[in-house]
Image (spheres, rainbow, N blue to C red):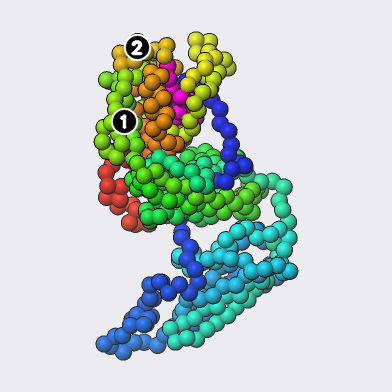
Amino acid sequence: MGKFTRAWAVTAALVTLVPLGLTGCGSSSEEPRIVGGGTEGGSSATPTSPAEPLSLSITPGTGAKKQPVSTEIGTTVAGGKVTDVTLTMEGGGKVEGALREDGSSWVPAVPLKYSKTYTASVTATNSTGQTDTKTTSFTTMSKPSSQVGSGLYLFDDKTYGVAMPVVVEFSPGIPKKDRAAVQKRMFVSTNPPQPGTWHWVSSGTQAYYRAPEYWQPGTTISVRIGLEGIPLSNGRYGNMDRKATGKIDNNKMELKVDNATKKMSVYENGNLIKTMPVSLGKKSTPSSSGTMVIMEKKAATTFDTMDDPNPANRYVTDVEYAQRLTWGGEYIHAAPWSVADQGRRNVSHGCVNVATANAKWLFEKTKIGDPITITGTEVKLANGNGWTAWNLSWAEFIKGSALPVPADLTSPGAAGTASPTT
């Protein structure tokens, strides 16, 4: 078992979570709205009632001051729909953005600037072509001194395994009453489209985004964590926006370890391609049973556990081909010293020991985000000890969302099976 170390990825370009998608204003692909018993652009065999009068209101109110740089242009429309939004900064250019799918607000594509004045103009249009335009001007707040640190474990132009969750970290953790507002600012899109949702660990220090099943091979995942300037109840503000676009590998790799047989089975695209003997954690330091994700890969590293409270577990050892599975220090790695035990008995401090040749083969074959499931050990994987998004059934996972989950994602068949592994 390696030493507990957890580096923040605060300087990296990381990714986001979001329950509501965005759409451009006036999109011709938008579904027609029901108007007075008929459908816009359609016909009816019976007379229709008069259209609802067009009305529009927007926020922030004119003259509003000290607004967060995460401010969205709120829109409330009756009798029509928003067809145009323009936001400009005084002395600056136009700000790009898009409407949320539910039309409740227009979201700037980037954080606003601190201590600047903005003017928004919103136009709504009804089925007869009548328009209503409202304008407002507001000033943003100065940059706050107390902020929440954040990190995103997704990087541009990187390729990941099919179980790679979108992982966002917060320091300190997000208070429970603020999580819905933060989750609304975490946006995820996939190509091809695959629905998903967020799950918060109890401490609020991590949130994971995943689909009901592993990502389809070849999927592109684009994320924006629009955290900068969002106000929290503890007097802090989000520190920055993070964006990243990653890709899921074209091959589906899965690792399965059975403590009963002391063997690892490696599957590629559902086909068994290799088995190898392993030695897991001994009874005093057992390996965790559950579905984990490869989080980090190091061709060579040093395990240093000299600060362990139990003297029997203290050691300093150089290892090769190490692949991290948990924050607590469980890895797959080469262990030439335990080859005689592999396939026969457990002697490790919690890691998955394999022969050097097998460790090298695995290291060259796997990617960060590949899943590994271990079964039959003395302890279960603790939620949050690593990227544990796939250690929960879909029914359990969606309970961790801070926002309501769409009905089509809560049905019993949404995940296909009760278990995320095949």
At label 2, the amino acid type is Asp
Gap in angstroms between the C-alphas marked 1 and 2: 20 Å
x and y percent of residue 178 in the render? 55, 50
Q: Secondary structure at mark 2?
A: loop
Q: Which residue is mark 1?
A: 266
Please tell me which residue is depicted at 54% across the width and 14% down the height of the picture.
316
Tell me: residue 355, above or below residue 140. above
Graded by Cα atoms within 10 Å as few (under 14), some (14 to 19) or many (20 or more), the crowding at tag 2 reads some
x and y percent of residue 360 in the render? 41, 25
Q: Quadrant of the C terminus?
A: top left
Please tell me which residue is depicted at 29% across the width and 27% down the height of the picture.
274
Q: How many marks?
A: 2
Please tell me which residue is depicted at 50% across the width and 86% down the height of the picture.
130
x and y percent of residue 273 in the render? 28, 31
Q: What are the residue bounds of the magenta stretch?
A: 321-335
Tell me: residue 139, above or below residue 229. below
Q: Compare residues 129 and 243 and report the one nearer the observer.
A: 243
Please tell me which residue is depicted at 34% across the width and 87% down the height of the picture.
48
Q: Which residue is mark 2?
A: 341
